[in-house]
């Protein structure tokens, strides 16, 4: 009888978890110039969404630094190119770049940074991309952000 009650309550917890939208994600970055995900799905029921960026490698940010930047897919290359000119002190992003929807700072090994943004900034049907603007990284460090 007791075991059955526990099983039922566990089941209730599990289904409750599935119903509630996850409005945050943790993204790891590495010394191999990679993110651990190629796609981030944001539930439309989320008012805000949080990205927690981590770096599980050993290299410092001036060698293998990573940030997490969100823009329209069409803007990715221009944002990255302007970011290279801005330099590491500016997190490889142009000051006040309006094409950037959200971004973290550049982090190195063992560091973390988070960013929270309004989901209302994203429109259904538009293609969005997340990427790293450290010079040369966006060829490998990128993925889709999908509003569902
Ligand atoms: Zn990077």
Image (cartoon, rainbow, N blue to C red):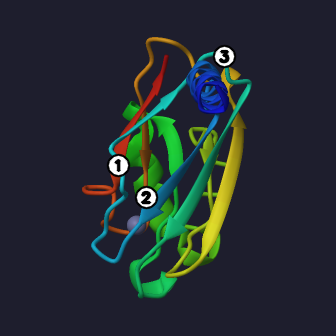
> Which numbered tag is attached to residue 3?
none
Q: Position of residue 77 (x, y in %)?
A: 36, 47
Q: From the Cβ of disc 1, is ligand 1 less than 8 Å away?
A: no
Within 10 Å of disc 3 (Cα), the crowding (few <14, some 14-19, many 20+) is few
Q: Quadrant of residue 125?
A: top left
Q: Earlier in the sequence, mark 3 or mark 1?
A: 3
Whether residue 93 is visible to the viewer of this picture, yes or no, is no
Q: Position of residue 142 (x, y in %)?
A: 35, 49
Indicate which quadrant contains ligand 1.
bottom left
Q: CA distance from mark 1 to mark 2?
A: 7 Å
Q: Residue at x 69, y 21 (%)?
A: 120
Q: From the Cβ of disc 2, is ligand 1 less than 8 Å away?
A: yes
| Eye-nearest disc, 2 or 3 | 3
Above or below residue 76? Residue 54 is below
Residue on which disc 2 sits: 132
Left or right of residue 92, residue 32 in this image: left
Asked if the residues shown at circle 1 and circle 2 are in contact, with their CB atoms under 8 angstroms apart, the answer is yes
Question: Secondary structure beneath disc 3?
Answer: loop
Q: Earlier in the sequence, mark 2 or mark 3?
A: 3
Above or below residue 63? Residue 52 is above
Within 10 Å of disc 1 (Cα), the crowding (few <14, some 14-19, many 20+) is many
Q: Position of residue 85 (x, y in %)?
A: 48, 67
Q: CA distance from mark 3 to mark 1?
A: 24 Å
Left or right of residue 16, residue 135 in this image: left
Q: Nearer the viewer, residue 97 or 105?
A: 105
Q: Residue at x 53, y 66 (%)?
A: 54
Residue on which disc 3 sits: 45
Whether residue 144 is visible to the viewer of this picture, yes or no, is yes
Q: Quadrant of residue 74?
A: top left
Q: Residue at x 48, y 55 (%)?
A: 27
> Which numbered tag is attached to residue 142?
1
Q: CA distance from mark 2 to mark 3?
A: 27 Å
């Amino acid at each position: 009888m007791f075991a059955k009650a526990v099983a039922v309550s566990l089941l209730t917890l599990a289904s409750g978890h599935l119903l509630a939208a996850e409005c945050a994600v943790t993204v790891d970055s590495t010394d191999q110039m990679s993110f651990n995900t190629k796609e981030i799905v944001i539930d439309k029921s989320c008012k805000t969404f949080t990205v927690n960026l981590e770096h599980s490698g050993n290299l410092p940010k001036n060698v293998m630094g990573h940030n997490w930047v969100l823009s329209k897919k069409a803007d990715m290359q221009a944002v990255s190119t302007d970011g290279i000119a801005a330099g590491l002190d500016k997190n490889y992003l142009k000051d006040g770049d309006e094409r950037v929807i959200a971004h973290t700072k550049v982090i190195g090994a063992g560091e973390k940074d988070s960013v929270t943004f309004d989901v209302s900034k994203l429109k259904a049907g538009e293609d969005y991309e997340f990427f790293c603007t450290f010079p040369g990284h966006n060829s490998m460090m990128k993925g889709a952000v999908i509003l569902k």
